[in-house]
């Protein structure tokens, strides 16, 4: 399929590379894999060649994880977000109009500043929303803020007013919450921990009442919904058996109603037909979006799988392009 649009495609900056040591990732995935990924994160030429080869017209770019979320110093995080958005615009988006757009980096260490930066990124830089890498550090490594927590609602208020989506991207679980992975460090990151952490984070958003307050908010999840299309029906039936006052949250509706009204899922890094069919069954073909997760995944693998997957051509056009075009108001 030609003309595909993809939404979870990462870049980096020299500053981000200085702030984050990739030694752990290199140990896990091999030095060669990480060196190749780091080269590709800074590149646009090879990226564009591959996009042409595999029928991807437009990529929505975002800063790779952990981005601004991992910077404990709030002032530094706020400045970093602004610099990053300017840099991504100058280096990638402006020289390649129509091929690259971007999701903004925002620093929830200061929700008012994050709201302001989202507005600047959307109105002045033409960005399409924000991508947030899970929880935000607000002090030492263990002091963090999740996106459903009250200080962050000031940011959500602005996202709702601007009517732009927020991509909830994974991050590794907190250091103090990894006992279950002891002896199996391979599971902490993208293989498993990413999905577990992000699925619970998304459920927190659903239970918090956020989508009752802002019914038009849209959250995008990668990796075919981080397991939620499969898991939510059981979550919902078990929650219905529980009594109020035990931490059910303040939400007025069932989790499945928020999932199908306020969420989209992408195929990033999950190029498997049966889970995609399950996501289509739970959410509808209007809420599934093709994506790669470049450069951690390959465009060739993603496109070859998607272009040949056993779905109708109508659904392929929606998932490959039309849903994203409508959601992001692309020409
Ligand atoms: Mn990713």
Image (cartoon, helix red, strand yellow):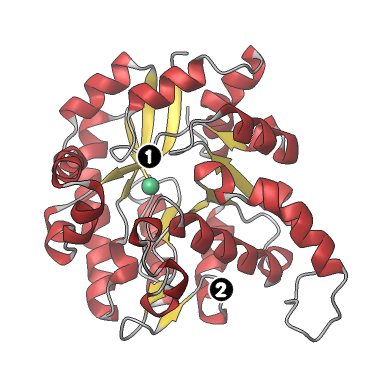
Residue 133 location (% of width, % of height): 40, 60
Is any part of residue 253 visible from this angle?
no
Quick check: 119 above or below 270?
Answer: below
Q: Secondary structure at mark 1?
A: loop
- The answer as to whether callout 2 falls within 8 Å of ligand 1 is no
Return the residue nearer the eye: 166 or 268. Answer: 268
Quarter occupied by residue 318: top right
Relative vertical location of residue 227 with respect to residue 93 in this rendering, above or below = below
Mark 2 or mark 1, which has the lower sequence index?
2
Where does label 2 land, which residue?
153
Q: For residue 137, say whether it is visible.
A: yes
Image quadrant assignment for residue 276: top right
User: CB under 8 Å between callouts 2 and 1?
Assistant: no
The 10 Å Cα crowd at callout 1, few under 14, some 14 to 19, many 20 or more, is: many
Counting from the top left corner in percent of width and height, residue 249 is at 72, 77
Q: Counting other residues with Cα less than 10 Å from the Cα at mark 2, is it few (<14), some (14-19), or many (20 or more)?
A: some
Kindly identify the residue that appears in the image at 17 percent across and 41 percent down: 91
Residue 234's mark?
none
Q: Secondary structure at mark 2?
A: helix
Q: Residue 208, percent across and down?
A: 67, 72
The mark closer to the camera, 2 or 1, is 1
Q: State the image coordinates of residue 325 (x, y, percent, origin top left).
A: 52, 30
Q: Residue at x 55, y 50 (%)?
A: 226
Q: Is mark 1 within 8 Å of ligand 1?
A: yes
On the picture, is 1 further left or further right than 50? right
Q: Name the residue at 67% across, 46% down.
A: 229
Is 263 on the left-hand or right-hand side of 9?
right
Q: Is residue 134 above or below residue 287?
A: below
Cα gap from disc 2 to disc 1, whole angstroms: 28 Å
Q: Residue at x 84, y 75 (%)?
A: 242
Quickly name the residue at label 1: 293
């Amino acid at each position: 399929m030609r003309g595909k649009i993809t939404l979870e495609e990462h870049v980096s900056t020299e500053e981000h590379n200085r702030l984050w040591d990739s030694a752990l990732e290199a140990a896990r995935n091999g030095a060669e894999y990480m060196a190749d990924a780091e080269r590709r994160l800074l590149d646009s030429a090879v990226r564009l060649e591959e996009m042409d080869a595999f029928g991807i017209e437009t990529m929505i770019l975002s800063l790779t994880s952990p981005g601004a979320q991992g910077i404990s110093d709030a002032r530094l995080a706020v400045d970093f977000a602004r610099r990053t958005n300017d840099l991504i615009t100058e280096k990638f988006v402006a020289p390649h109009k129509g091929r690259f757009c971007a999701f903004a980096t925002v620093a929830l260490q200061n929700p008012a500043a994050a709201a302001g930066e989202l507005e600047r990124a959307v109105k002045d830089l033409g960005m399409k929303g924000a991508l947030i890498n899970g929880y935000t550090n607000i002090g030492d490594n263990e002091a963090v803020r999740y996106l459903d927590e009250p200080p962050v609602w000031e940011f959500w208020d602005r996202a709702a007013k601007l009517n732009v989506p927020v991509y909830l991207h994974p991050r590794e679980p907190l250091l103090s919450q990894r006992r279950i992975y002891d002896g199996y460090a391979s599971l902490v990151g993208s293989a498993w921990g990413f999905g577990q952490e992000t699925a619970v984070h998304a459920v927190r958003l659903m239970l918090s009442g956020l989508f009752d307050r802002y019914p038009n908010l849209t959250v995008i999840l990668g990796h075919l919904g981080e397991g939620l299309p499969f898991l939510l029906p059981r979550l919902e039936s078990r929650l219905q058996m529980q009594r109020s006052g035990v931490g059910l949250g303040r939400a007025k509706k069932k989790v499945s109603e928020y999932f199908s009204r306020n969420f989209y899922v992408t195929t990033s890094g999950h190029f498997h037909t049966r889970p995609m069919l399950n996501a289509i069954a739970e959410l509808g073909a209007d809420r599934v979006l093709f994506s790669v997760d470049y450069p951690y995944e390959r465009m060739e693998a993603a496109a070859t799988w998607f272009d040949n997957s056993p779905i109708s051509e109508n659904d392929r056009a929606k998932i490959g392009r039309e849903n994203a075009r409508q959601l992001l108001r692309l020409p």
